[in-house]
Image (cartoon, grey):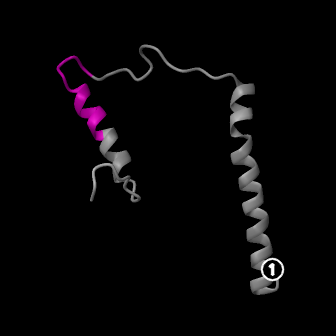
């Protein structure tokens, strides 16, 4: 597998978690994930950014309902 290719099974996410946990074992104790700078987004900005995903989820749900009715007559 090419190293630039993402793994569909979720192994890459676990690898990242393990890498972070191992890097915390530098003798200084566990790393605090809330320490240092972080990106903060207001609720208004979050809702605006999430709107397309919410819309797509609603469309998908409706399409699934239609397909189920056509397939099973429900």
Q: Is residue 60 left or right of residue 11?
A: right
Q: In which quarter of the image is residue 31?
A: top left
Q: x, y (%) of residue 50? A: 69, 39
Q: Residue at x 72, y 62 (%)?
A: 60
Is 4 included in the stretch rendered in magenta? no
Q: Write the start and end of the magenta stretch as one range.
A: 18-29
Q: How many numbered callouts?
A: 1
Is 27 included in the stretch rendered in magenta? yes
Q: x, y (%) of residue 68? A: 75, 78
Q: Which residue is drawn at 69% across and 47% down?
A: 53
Q: Which residue is drawn at 74% across and 41% down?
A: 51
Q: Say above or below: 22 vs 6.
A: above
Q: x, y (%) of residue 11? A: 34, 53
Q: Is mark 1 on a helix, strand or loop?
A: helix
Image quarter of the C terminus: bottom right
Q: Quadrant of residue 16?
A: top left
| Residue bearing the label numbered 1 | 69
């Amino acid at each position: 597998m090419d190293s630039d290719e993402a793994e569909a099974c979720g192994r890459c996410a676990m690898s990242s978690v393990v890498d972070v946990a191992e890097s915390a074992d530098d003798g200084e104790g566990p790393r605090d994930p809330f320490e240092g700078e972080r990106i903060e987004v207001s609720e208004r900005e979050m809702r605006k950014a999430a709107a397309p995903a919410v819309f797509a989820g609603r469309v998908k749900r409706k399409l699934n309902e239609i397909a189920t009715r056509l397939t099973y007559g429900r």
